[in-house]
Amino acid sequence: MPCTIIKPLDDESGTTTNAAQQQQPVARPTLVKTLDGTLHKIRDSTKLIPLTAPDDYVGISDVLHLAHITEASLLHTLRLRYKRDEIYTNAGPILISINPYRNITLGHAESIYSENQMLLYRTKSASSTYREDEMPPRAHLRT
């Protein structure tokens, strides 16, 4: 999950270092803040992986299009998409699915597994002008 370094901690007691060193990763306990405002104490901020490309922040539908494919960027993309109820993500020709343990509906209260959705995907995929990035990933596209 993306986070911002708030301040390095001098020791386990939680005292802080001087202001000049606060934004630099250090190999000791550090206080970080995630996008939702939660504060976390981590052991070593040098292990944080910077998100560098805009696609790292939006959760794109095909992880092979990430600028830097790492375990962290893959998990972050899946986490973002899951939070938006986008439980299917492509990895090239492979479909990654995360079970939400509940029914997922579209904005107009239609299930993603409804007959209308299946027919829409079936019709689109049979079209000669169909491009994979036109519609969100779904199991309906797999043959």
Image (spheres, rainbow, N blue to C red):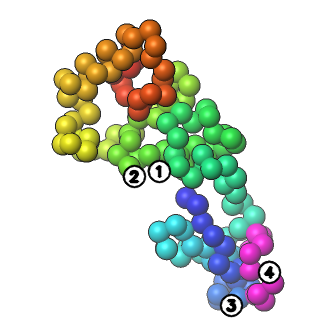
**Picture quarter containing residue 44?**
bottom right
Q: Is residue 36 above or below residue 103?
A: below
Give the spatial CA distance, label 1 vs label 3: 33 Å
Of the image marks 4 and 2, the number of the one nearer the N terminus: 4
The foreground one among 139 and 117 is 117
Image point 57% across, 36% down: which residue?
63
Residue 80, numbered circle: 1
Residue under numbered circle 2: 83
Give the spatial CA distance, label 1 vs label 2: 5 Å
Pointers 1 and 2 in contact (CB under 8 A)? yes
Pointers 4 and 3 in contact (CB under 8 A)? no
SS under mark 4: helix
Residue under numbered circle 3: 15
Which residue is situated farthest in the right direction here? Answer: 20
45 in the magenta segment:
no
Mark 2 or 3: in front is 2
Residue under numbered circle 4: 21
Image point 26% across, 41% down: which residue?
106
Q: Is residue 83 above or below residue 16?
A: above
**Picture quarter containing residue 47?**
bottom right
> Magenta span covers which residues?
17-28
Mark 4 or 3: in front is 4
Binning the other alpha carbons within 10 Å of mark 3 as few (below 14), some (14 to 19) or many (20 upward) gives few
Pointers 2 and 3 in contact (CB under 8 A)? no
Kind of residue indicated by mark 4: Gln
Q: Position of residue 54 (x, y in %)?
A: 62, 50
Kind of residue indicated by mark 1: Leu
SS under mark 2: helix
Give the spatial CA distance, label 4 vs label 1: 31 Å
Give the spatial CA distance, label 4 vs label 2: 34 Å
